[in-house]
Image (cartoon, helix red, strand yellow):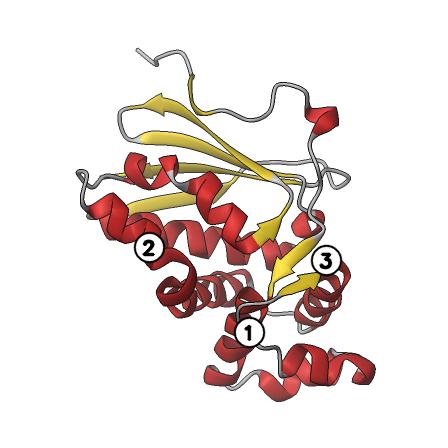
């Protein structure tokens, strides 16, 4: 019998007071660009990137904060490449591999010391999110011993399929470090929402 959903990582009670993302960590953008280079997609990406923003984005210095608008320009160029869903998810997995050493390893090492299941990582999601964005929030509900629903809110990039599928790749890759097999699917959303939701399960 299905269990009643249990709040595991709470979202703010009043969604109207939730601050939307104002800045994105340059490390995330730099990792995304690096993954495009590695996969031979850089020229295709630059073709769609406005020339006025080439230096700012292509040569972004890791470890700084960039205005949310810069991230929008990056994701518009990524979306314009017209990659398949599978290719986009792979990009997200590649990005997570690049940024783990700079943004996620502290969290992952802390999790390893406690017991090591995806639930351990989910507890750290607010901390992880704060290392990538200024603003926004994340919530997790428990739907079974190995089944969760994850919701990222207040993120304007959620309108880009490239961002959502890439985030799915990141979520899958990070959680998979703590189980044998991980499954992550995007849940339906309204196009107007600044939210991305996933169903996550593992074995």
Q: Along the polypeptide, which appears first: circle 2 or circle 1? A: 1
Quarter of the N terminus within the rendering: top left
Q: Along the polypeptide, which appears first: circle 1 or circle 3? A: 1
Q: Residue 68 carries which label?
A: 3
Q: What element carries label 2?
A: helix
3D distance between C-alphas at marks 2 and 1: 19 Å
Name the quadrant containing residue 61.
Answer: bottom right
Quarter of the C terminus within the rendering: top left
Q: Is mark 1 on a helix, strand or loop?
A: helix
- The residue singled out by tag 1 in the image is 30
Q: Which residue is drawn at 65% across and 84% down?
A: 44
The local crowd at label 3, few if under 14, some if 14 to 19, many if 20 or more residues have their Cα within 10 Å, is some
Q: Residue at x 41, y 44 (%)?
A: 184
When the figure is inspected, residue 29 is found, relative to residue 177, above or below; the finding is below
Q: Residue at x 19, y 48 (%)?
A: 180
Task: Tell which of 31 and 81 is nearer to you.
Answer: 31
Q: Along the polypeptide, which appears first: circle 2 or circle 3? A: 3
Name the quadrant containing residue 5.
Answer: top left
Q: What element carries label 3?
A: helix
- The residue singled out by tag 2 in the image is 106
Q: Is residue 103 left or right of residue 42?
A: left
């Amino acid at each position: 019998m299905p269990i009643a959903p249990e709040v595991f990582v709470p979202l703010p009670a009043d969604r109207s007071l939730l601050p939307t993302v104002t800045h994105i960590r340059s490390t995330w953008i730099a990792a995304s660009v690096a993954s495009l280079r590695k996969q031979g997609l850089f020229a295709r990406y630059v073709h769609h990137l406005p020339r006025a923003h080439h230096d700012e984005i292509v040569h972004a210095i890791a470890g700084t904060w960039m205005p949310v608008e810069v991230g929008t320009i990056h994701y518009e160029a990524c979306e314009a490449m017209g990659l398949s869903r599978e290719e986009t998810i792979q990009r997200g997995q590649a990005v997570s591999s690049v940024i783990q050493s700079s943004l996620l390893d502290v969290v992952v090492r802390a999790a390893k010391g406690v017991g090591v299941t995806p639930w351990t990582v989910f507890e750290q999601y607010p901390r992880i999110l704060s290392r990538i964005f200024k603003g926004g929030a994340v919530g997790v509900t428990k739907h079974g011993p190995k089944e969760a629903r994850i919701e990222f809110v207040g993120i304007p990039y959620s309108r880009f399929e490239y961002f959502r599928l890439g985030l799915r790749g990141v979520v899958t890759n990070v959680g998979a470090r703590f189980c044998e097999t991980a499954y992550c699917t995007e849940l339906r959303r309204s196009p107007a929402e600044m939210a991305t939701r996933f169903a996550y399960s593992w074995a």
